Image (cartoon, helix red, strand yellow):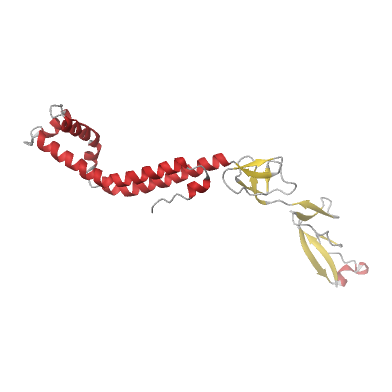
Amino acid sequence: MDKRYGYNRQTRHYTGPCPVPAALLDPVNQSAAPADTLPFAPPIPDGHQVVLVNTTFDDWELVADYTGTVYSKADGQPVEHIELGELPTDLTRLAPATPYDEWNDATQSWVTHTAKQLEGTKAAKLQDVNAWADRQLTPLRYLYPEGERDSWPIQRYEAKMWEADNTTPTPYIDALIMDSGETREALLAKILENIRQYDGLTTPVNRQARTLRQAIKAAATVEEVEAIVVPD
């Protein structure tokens, strides 16, 4: 039993040893070796090489192999690299540690841009605070019809102005009570009571959200931002 070493003629990749009965290699009987094989073993590749047969199909060669996921030095985004050979200079096998890393040619490594990291971490934490506040306030808003909610600013303005000075004109309120039989004073009293009830429900949420936002703004490090706890 003899041994040959095979390759894929289309891709030129080494496919492994293939034992061959000696009879097949007997020149007297004019037998031939199996196609797409060489009679000698290829060199052993290191971790980033692949064995190919050369373009004349008579010897082996080692070619750099960096196929797979690599990273763009420009923005740190992953790239699926499919070509054999040395890695292009704008790509690296090293993965950035954070979304705020920048490639440093001098050290051939990623360096975290701490100012951008702090800014981004603050922005993400603020989104968490705003999302929490919305979750608390949205059910309260939907206790009232949408049309009524749309008119809250003008109702609040006229009611508060009238509360401070009952001679203040209230054209929007006057339009609401037209032909209704309800007095302006009665409707304004209801509006003011609704304002007090709604503010009583929403003020604690808004107060806590404001406190959290102030803490985020004042934080000087990423660790300080991450230590701020946003309620579930």
Residue 34 seen in the current view: no
The extreme right residue here reads: 28
- Report the label total: 0
Q: Position of residue 4 (x, y in %)?
A: 83, 65
Residue 197 visible (yes or no): yes
Front in this rendered view, residue 23 or 117 = 117
Instruction: Using the image, determine if residue 21 lies above or below residue 7.
Output: below
Outermost residue toward the left in this view: 181
Left or right of 30 on screen, residue 84: left
Query: On the rendered structure, is 185 left or right of 30?
Result: left
Residue at position x 24%, y 40% in the image: 149
Q: Residue at x 10, y 35 (%)?
A: 185
Residue 43 falls in image quadrant: bottom right
Q: Residue at x 83, y 69 (%)?
A: 20
Q: Position of residue 90 (x, y in %)?
A: 68, 41
Quadrant housing the C terminus: bottom left
Q: Is residue 75 left or right of residue 14?
A: left
The picture places residue 86, in percent across and down from the top left corner, at 75, 46
Residue 159 or residue 39, whichever sits in front: 159
Q: Is residue 113 left or right of residue 200?
A: right
Looking at the rendering, in which quadrant would you find the N terminus?
Answer: bottom right
Q: Residue at x 47, y 45 (%)?
A: 124
Residue 112: % across, % down: 60, 43
